[in-house]
Amino acid sequence: MDEGLRSELSKAGVFTTSLNELYNWGRKNSVWPLQFGLACCAIEMIAASMARFDIARFGAEVFRPSPRQADLMIVAGTVTKKMAPQVVRLYNQMPEPKYVIAMGACAISGGPFKQGYNVLKGIDRYIPVDVHIPGCPPRPEALLHALMTLQKRIEEQALTGETRPRHLDANQPSEFPIPAFGAHDLEPPSNPAIWSPPKTDRGC
Amino acid sequence: MQALQGFSQEENPYIFLAVFLVAAAVFAVTPLALAALWAMKYSPRKSGPSKNAVYECGLESKTQDWVQFKSDYYLYGIIFLVFDVEVIFLLPFAVAFKTLPVGAFVAIMIFLLLLVEGLVWAWRKGVLNWK
């Protein structure tokens, strides 16, 4: 619909919308997170859900204890290599459409444990992350900002066409390969379909 | 007008019940049908082995998901009900005992007999022995 016409109509008191907008409006205002925490970031996530920060203002207060009822996975904390397969499996068990917020330095990159042998260097190696939050730990405001960012992204998703999101495309996978414990590392060490090592241009 | 006469409230007081029945069915089925239509048109099914797994806490189940539960406790619960119901009915019976007619006495005795019968049956089946 033409934006000018829409603004004219809204001035005249006529509200117009499209099926796509209605669908996204409903989805973005009822993002139900999965209730699980991996490390200290989870404490900030809990704080964000309590009265002072009140994540309920964004329709995301219904923390579900089962992946079958959740839309959003907040990876709050250090993902150890022992825990990574379980996190991926939980993600696989969530129904579509599903989103991931990687919360804190550990979840996005390994954080202070990046050089350690037992910590995954970012959960985006195995599952598609929608919003990354830096910080150690991020304040509840940062989590709220991530949620708002996610809501904006949901709002912009197309219902049809080539740019439609994964959950509306029958050819896109809904489950991602679960890594297994190998002799030295997780196998495979990353999912090449969604993550590749950043290329560094050393100029030589 | 003549055809509608049969549906008036005076002639058929159950007409509201029928209307409620239909409204309830429509109310329940419409969202489901809309969701099914939506899924057909826009959002394809996305199932997979993890999603269809019985266990849902991130770990894989190590054994068969279909297990047999010991039904002993359930049987005890059923038999407890015999005593439970007995007490509830016996107390007012005992309180009003002196003023009761013979018919009421016989009725409560039949009721007790039915309950005791159940207990004896369970006893003879060996349900009261914890194995």
Image (cartoon, coloured by chain):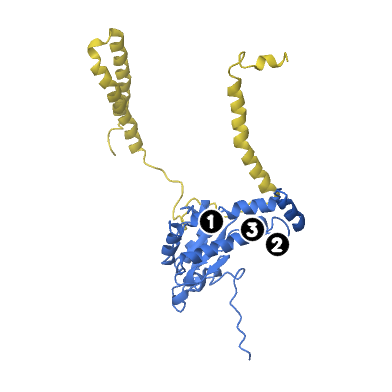
Chain colours: A blue, B yellow
Q: Which residue is drawn at 72% across and 15% down?
A: B3
Q: Are marks 3 and 2 on the same chain?
A: yes
Q: Which amino acid, mark 3?
A: Glu
- Nearer to me, B53 or B43: B43
The disc, 3 or 1, on the residue closer to the chain's N-terminal end is 1
CA distance for labels 3 and 1: 14 Å
- The percent position of residue A72, horizontal first and vertical second, equals 54, 58
Quarter of the image where the N terminus of chain A is located: bottom right
**Residue labelled with disc 2:** A163
Total label count? Answer: 3
Residue that lies at the very extreme toward the bottom in this rendered image: A204
- Is mark 3 in CB contact (under 8 Å) with mark 1? no
- Nearer to me, A137 or B43: A137
Q: Which residue is drawn at 47% across and 77% down?
A: A114
Classify A197 as above or below B71.
below
**Mark 3 or mark 1: which is in front?**
1
CA distance for labels 2 and 1: 26 Å
- The percent position of residue A70, horizontal first and vertical second, equals 52, 54
Chain containing mark 1:
A
Q: Which amino acid, mark 2?
A: Thr
Q: Which mark is residue A58?
A: 1
Residue A23 at least partly seen: yes
**Residue labelled with disc 3:** A155
- Nearer to me, A157 or A201: A157
| Left/right of residue A105 with respect to residue B6 in the rendered view | left
